Image (tube, rainbow, N blue to C red):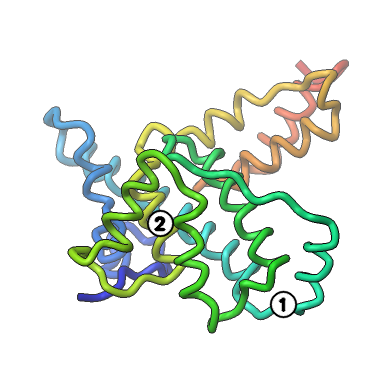
Amino acid sequence: MTAPSTRYASLEPQSVESDHIARRVGYNSLGAADPRPKDAAASRVETSRLRNATVYTIERLAALIREQVGEPTSALLTQVAKAYKLPMPGTYNGVDDINTLELWLGKILRWMRLYHVTGPDRDAERVALLGSFLDGEAARWYTQEVESPTRAHCVWTFEDVIASMYSRFIHRASAQTAASRFMASRYSRSKGIAGFFSELKEQASRMVEQPDKYTSKRLFLSGTPGGVQ
């Protein structure tokens, strides 16, 4: 029994490594979502595009994890956190929405960083703590796949668990929404111009194929009061 890998170095659809990655994180379940027969060439393009989106997003989540908790932090942060009585992070229930998953993960990582649950030596603690921040289908999945004596993989890293959760709960439709959300972003008085710009940047960062500067600038200008139409 081995732990699944989250080292997604290659995004090339035809590479041996990306095929291996896709299988290990459960990509086949995404590819099998539409059972209708397709033209072989179109099917290969669709499969490559979905694989790229899956690998890109999981690597981005892994990079966030390494940035926030990969290296040990000062125990002084824990004293500060306790002094301010910081609230516990919320839970994730397995909802099929990448934004919800990322916001939840960000809160978990922030809490772990402040409470000194950081560095390679405390990775097992991060895996154990994660179960306390799950409910619903996500909690059931964690119990079966990570804790159960009959689990397929005996040893999990924190990155592995998050990658597998993404594969299990974020399906094709949600994985493709970044581009749609980017194009649908609109200015509103409540969030202001700065908020609109921040939203565009956030959605663009989630896209496998980053929008060019012209597209981003035109969308921003056309969406602001008095902008280019």
Look at the picture and state if 144 lies above or below 118. above
Which residue is located at x 31 percent, y 63 percent? 147
Towards the viewer: 137 or 16: 137
Marks 1/2 in contact by CB < 8 Å: the verdict is: no
Residue 111: x percent and y percent? 67, 59
Residue 110 showing in the rendered view: yes
Residue 139: x percent and y percent? 38, 47
Mark 1 → mark 2, Cα distance in angstroms: 29 Å
Which residue is located at x 60 percent, y 79 percent? 119
At label 2, counting other C-alpha atoms closer than 10 Å, the crowd grade (few under 14, some 14-19, many 20 or more) is many
At label 1, counting other C-alpha atoms closer than 10 Å, the crowd grade (few under 14, some 14-19, many 20 or more) is some
Residue 36: x percent and y percent? 14, 28
Residue 210 showing in the rendered view: no
Towards the viewer: 141 or 212: 141
Tell me the amino acid under the disc marked 1.
Thr
Residue 158: x percent and y percent? 46, 67
Which residue is located at x 84 percent, y 66 percent? 80
Q: Which mark is residue 213?
A: none
User: Left of 82 or right of it: where is 144?
Assistant: left
The residue sitting at the left extreme is 37
The residue sitting at the bottom extreme is 121
Q: Which mark is residue 55?
A: 2
Tell me the amino acid under the disc marked 2.
Val
Which residue in the protein does label 1 denote?
73
